[in-house]
Image (cartoon, rainbow, N blue to C red):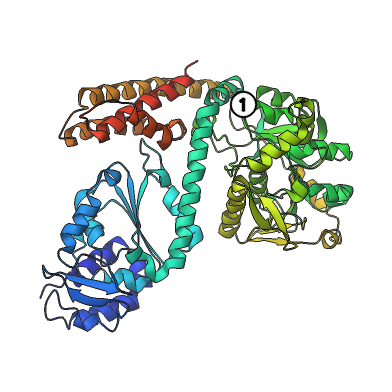
Amino acid sequence: MNSIWNKNVESFTKRFPQLSQIYKQIIEQITLLDKQKKSLQDFEPFTNMFNFWNFSLAKNGAVISTQNNLTLHSSYNPQREAFNSVNNANIKEKQTTVFLGIGLGYQVVEWASLYQNKKLIIIEPEPLYFFASLVFLDWTNVFKIPNLIIAIECPTENILPLLENQNQINIANNGINNSFFFNSKAFTQHAQNYFDVINTIIQRNKSKNEINAATYQKFAKRWIKNSQKNFYKQSELQTICNFQNKASPNLPFCIVAAGPSLEQALPYLQEIKKRAIIVCVETALFAFLKENIQPDFIILSDPQYWAYKHIASLAAPQSILITEISVYPAVFRFNCKKIMLCSSLFPIGQFVQQHTHEFGNLGAGGSVASSAWNFALFCGAKQIFTLGLDLSFPKNQTHIKGSSAEQSFHTTSTKTKSVENHTSNILFSANTKKALNYKNEQVITDSRMEMFAWWFESKIAANNQTKTYSLCSQSMKIPGIEFYSLDDFLQKPEIQNLKNDFLNTTHKNLISKKQLELIKIEFETKINQSLQICKSIIKICEENLSCKNENLVLEQIQTLQNKMISLQINELINLCEPSQKKLNLELEKLQICDYNITIAKKMIFYSNLYDNIKLFIN
């Protein structure tokens, strides 16, 4: 008898040789049982090994199963049910489909028969559940998919990079936002806690991506204008790349944010500075200078004008300012020891870095404190301490007294808009919640702060060789960050020689002005080419809005999309993508009675993309 199992295992082993070695023992056990089968639908030999399922036959003779009284597939025709569930517009418009559990695999097999050119990710924490699905169904088409990832026993902290690392750029939201998640309770019940964590990760990142897209849409013109004005700073200034992994294992870093709890640590800042590299966010600089102390580094990565206001009129001639080219231009006039560039989060800077070297990526965690933590990690720190990273409102305060943020409240306050109005607006504008601090006392936080806290939690879990501690017991407790007594920290030895060795690291500029000129010409050429492609796609969509057979139209669009991909301006496209909310609103305004919704969405998308890309033309 021609065994489906043998056929599947052969294909699996060829496609994933390392996985097949890891699960060699399970494969051998199933192979022995498979030899006892009397027919393709005979499930009797597997009832003990796969005792988590109760097998039976559907009305059409196909094998089905139940678990905890939940039927995994249709008891009449599981193939037809599976086909109907994957043959829908939501899956068609996404580049990636992610299966959270697969049952016996009917949906996966039917999906593979329809979408060979899309990306498929299968997530299954229990190996036996995955290999059981290879016993009864032919997975030939699944293993032929070019973009196929099978994540068996993948730790939850590795799921996000797996979902976001989309090597093939798609002209629609990338990563999680361009993925359809097939999430059936019947398929996830066996590891519900595991899948609950993954669903939380997915929802948090969808929210983060939507916030990022909305923020970009709101401030795009300002950030592009800043990048254009600051363009040649990329050849004039040094970058942080030479600091990468240069920190001694015995050199602690201390990240200082402007939370209210920082006030208690102010008298000890000078002693802390003797024992660690101080990395200060720009909002805390005023408090430092008020104590006549200058941090080793200042991080300013927010391109908005108000971020510059935090350092305007200040001076720190002993400090190094780390920033990026999209910041408000006056930042580059700040009086400090040196200004150094990190990688930009925005298209013009990213395009330059594609053609040179990365300037030193400090990532995007939603707050400047996350950039400061990333900088410490980038330098190779094995111990990172935090001050003022409250992510909550101790004693209903939003910032340390005397911080630049609080000072700005005073300077802009009026009789009808007092400082208390500013504070209450911040306190109650983002779903106020309760959390615990390191004393296990309740503190007030909100959904924004929770998002930042989750970012730290996930980054720390993914980089467990670096330990992070809080020196402030009033700060919100973040999983992965332990409390460390300030008294104990002050018992650490002074390390001025180690600090000097690190701070005196030599640097060089990565790019000349001539190189920069050539890159600028190439960038402008590709911008114009991408605009022409957008116009061509919009025209095709307009001419075929009422088309009944969309396949031919989508093929034409895909050809043009591939041309845009070949321009290699992926980061530009990603940041110019309109949010899903905006697309849905515009779709509702179309006022067309009989139109193809898939083509209509493409037309709206590329119309928005065209408008956004056009911003890059001077």
Residue 474's image quarter?
A: bottom right
Residue 555: x and y in percent read: 21, 34
The residue identified by callout 1 is 235
The answer to whether residue 74 is left or right of residue 131 is left
Bin the neighbour count of mark 1 within 10 Å (Cα to Cα): few under 14, some 14-19, many 20 and up.
Answer: some
The answer to whether residue 10 is left or right of residue 221 is left
Residue 537: x and y in percent read: 28, 26
Please state, as top left, top right, bottom left or bottom right, where the N terminus lies in the image: bottom left
Residue 77's image quarter?
A: bottom left
Q: Is residue 297 above or below residue 611?
A: below
The residue under the point 56% across, 55% down is 458
The answer to whether residue 440 is left or right of residue 51 is right
Q: Is residue 586 above or below residue 617?
A: below
Q: Residue furthest top?
A: 618
Nearer to the camera, 382 or 180: 180
Q: Residue furthest front?
A: 416
Q: Is residue 418 visible?
A: yes
Residue 179: x and y in percent read: 37, 47
Q: Amino acid at mark 1?
A: Ser
Residue 17: x and y in percent read: 33, 65
**SS at mark 1?**
helix
Disc tally is 1
The residue under the point 29% across, 46% down is 91
Q: Is residue 399 above or below residue 582?
A: below
Nearer to the camera, 44 or 432: 432
Q: Is residue 347 visible?
A: no
The residue under the point 77% across, 55% down is 472
Nearer to the camera, 508 or 96: 96
